Image: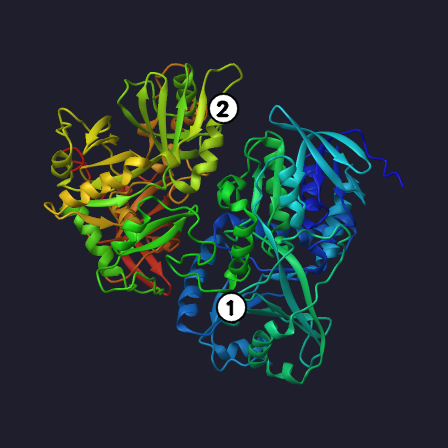
Amino acid sequence: MSKNIPEKAKVVIVGGGIIGCSIAYHLTKLGWNDVVLLERKQLTCGTTWHAAGLLTTLRGTENATKLAKYTQDVLSELEAETGQATGFMRIGSIQVASNEAYLEEMRRGSNMARYFGVESQEIAPEQILDFWPMANVSDVSAGFHFPNDGRANPTDATMAYAKGAKSRGARIIEGVVVLDLVTKNKSITNVITDHGDIAADYVVNCAGMWARDLGKLAGVDIPLHAAEHYYLITEKLEGMHQNLPILRDPYNCAYYREETGKLMLGIFETEAAPWGQDGIPDDFCFDELPPDWERMMPYLEKAMQRIPSMENAGIQLLFNGPESFTPDHNYLMGKAPGLDNFYIAAGFNSLGILSSGGAGMVMAHWIAEGHPPMDVFDADIRRMHHFQNNPKYLHDRTVESLGIGYQNHWPYRQWETSRGVKKSPLHDRMAKQGACFGESAGWERPFWFAPQGVEPKYEYGFERQSWFQYWKEEHLAIRENVGMIEQGAFSKIMVEGRHAVDVMNRIACNNVDVPPGQVIYTQFLNERGTIEADLTISRLAEDQFLVLTAPFTHTHILNWIKDRISEGQHCFVSDVTSAYGMLNIQGPHSRALLQRVSETDFSNEAFPFGTCQNITIGYHTALAVRLTYVGELGWELYIPTEYLQQVYDLLVQEGTRFGLKHCGVHALGSLRLEKAYREWGHDVGGDDTLIEAGLSFTADLDKKNGFIGKEAFLAQKAKAIKEKRLVQFLLEDPEPLLFHNELIWVDGKLNSITTSAAYGHSLGAAVALGYVYHEEGVTPDFIANARFEIQVADKMYAAKASLRPFYDPKSLRVKV
């Protein structure tokens, strides 16, 4: 039967689950009426139909929480607007903490919720029984009540979004399979279906479990994998009624809610079963998978201990349905790298219902305006890497990623699956030195080093972890002597060509048109004047630049540069990350060590700060860059991979004269925080300006032809009052630890949260960065006269605050 497919549409959305229908709804609210949504079978028939419909609000970041809060707001109004019921009920939720670790985590989370505008309160175990009298709380330390959380009927909510979209002109066509996507000149021009072709200005991939396959048609990596996902429904159970709050029990990997007088038990097992690796059947529609009772029995037994009356209740259903999960348990949203009109909204990790309204709103604005209305980089598809689309990698990571949300969110926690993807040529040498490796963008990086006889293994906790003393020794070695940090994982991007200087000077806010051999610290701004990157650029020749950026920003930065090369410009971008290792030699004795192994003159006069040179080192040559991210004298050595092992061996051999110590990523982090050096994605990002971040000095307003974001920056600068500023904090008490997202109180009032934190081993207490807000301006006088406290769980600690670094504020040590 013909489906009467239109020949052209402004927007084609592929996928009729709750996310696709929400995007259609929100696009039409913006006045984009020429919207076509294609569903391969029937609306909701993939994953949406069997979702539990939980609307829990608190997420791991402020902006993810905003998506969830917005979803509740829109669902509360959608029925009145469309006449279609959504099943939305604001029944609240309770999360139980059944050991001290979960109690500490939830107290921290409840603090964060307060700042995010999510109402919550800690309640005693007996108070839990006021809400859930059938629960066993004998092992519970406390509960945390979120009174505004709720639930909805996923199918009804989807139909409401669809009805609202159709009422404003959108077309929703079921029974249409997308066969191919035609690309030309960095755009998708046509969507090929089994009922005809559609020319499209924009294409949105909301295909859920099928999103990865759809992305491959356009050459786009969309790393996600389906897994079996379970819930159980009992027969009628006494005490169950529709106003019962959702009960979440992370220690037992479970949640409980009412379902028509019965009990629904949802399970997020610690070791999941990936599904669909051999392909999803073509006829898949409202399908169930056969349940594995044996694998589920340990979880059912734990559930019966929490709700003892379950033991005597009949089981109506053990449901097993597939849902898709991503490698880092965050959503995949935004514009596809390398294509101008292809957008993705998939991989919602069993959180699609609670984020549906917010995701639809964000995506609609992203499509209509070219950028999201808030910084959502933790969900941005540009954070992902090509290797993560490997099917075996996805299969193995999904075993862990399904249940990660119900496990302890330990400080410094490392993924355990799909490890060893990328290793430096020095990996084995680092291991022999006692490296405890952590993962960053697939790279195995030394995070800290264990002394001989100590197993290099994390033992997690919110207190001082077992490696705290070793971390301190590494930190102080760089402050007082000399340390080596292996940083080959950092992304190295070469930009070359006759017009390379024009391209880079337009993108960077600082002036990169400097003599070869100069190194520039700069940001990339967007047109709104907020920060898209924080990085260094070395000018190697008149027509050649080396861009250095953090591993997790690799895809983002590579495509940010490529996308801003105009047609006809002679400029080429190459990823040379694997061609060079990087050894970072830092500390007061770094000059003496390097002078020992090289004929190059490392004196201030011959090799000043902020410059780079090709140096001899042993039998080899390397690019030496005199920079620091730790606040000490030091050089970054970029060494061709084939020379790396011998250069390393030479440095270690000669380093014994100077007490050279191997240092890890944690030491790098604590050292940079003592100097208040910013980290993009934590301290600065797409919601922050140069002025707010204290980085205005990197904007060159006099350079020829300006830079992207200059006009917005000038408008920001014209405002005399700086009501938001990034501030450094140092606790007065040396004992507490800070990690990030701790509450900042100013003069007894809640003000903001920390953006990043670590223990400042040189300063003698925990140190943090965080934005402070004050309508009359965050000035030095305000900072000097205000009273600052930082809340850790349920305790308040006095803190010193400063707009200048506590450690070496004049940067004298860097330039000796």
Give SS at disc 2: loop
User: For this view, does 513 lie left or right of residue 35?
Assistant: left
Report the residue at 31% width, 42% height from top: 487
Looking at the rendered structure, the kind of residue marked 1 is Pro
Q: On screen, 84 above or below 486?
A: below
Which image quarter holds the N terminus? top right
Mark 2 lies on residue: 564
Residue 68, given in percent of the width and then of the height, sits at 58, 53
Q: Residues within 10 Å of mark 1 (few under 14, many from 20)?
A: many
Residue mark closest to the camera, 2 vs 1: 2
Give SS at disc 1: helix
Give the mark, 2 or 1, whose residue is nearer the N terminus.
1
Question: How many tags in the picture?
Answer: 2
Which residue extends farthest bottom?
Answer: 312
Residue 577 or residue 674, whichever sits in front: 577
Looking at the rendered structure, the kind of residue marked 2 is Arg
Residue 352, given in percent of the width and then of the height, sits at 62, 53
Report the residue at 35% width, 44% height from top: 424
Disc ID at residue 250: 1
Report the residue at 66% width, 38% height from top: 204
**Residue 787, can we see it?**
no
Disc ID at residue 735: none
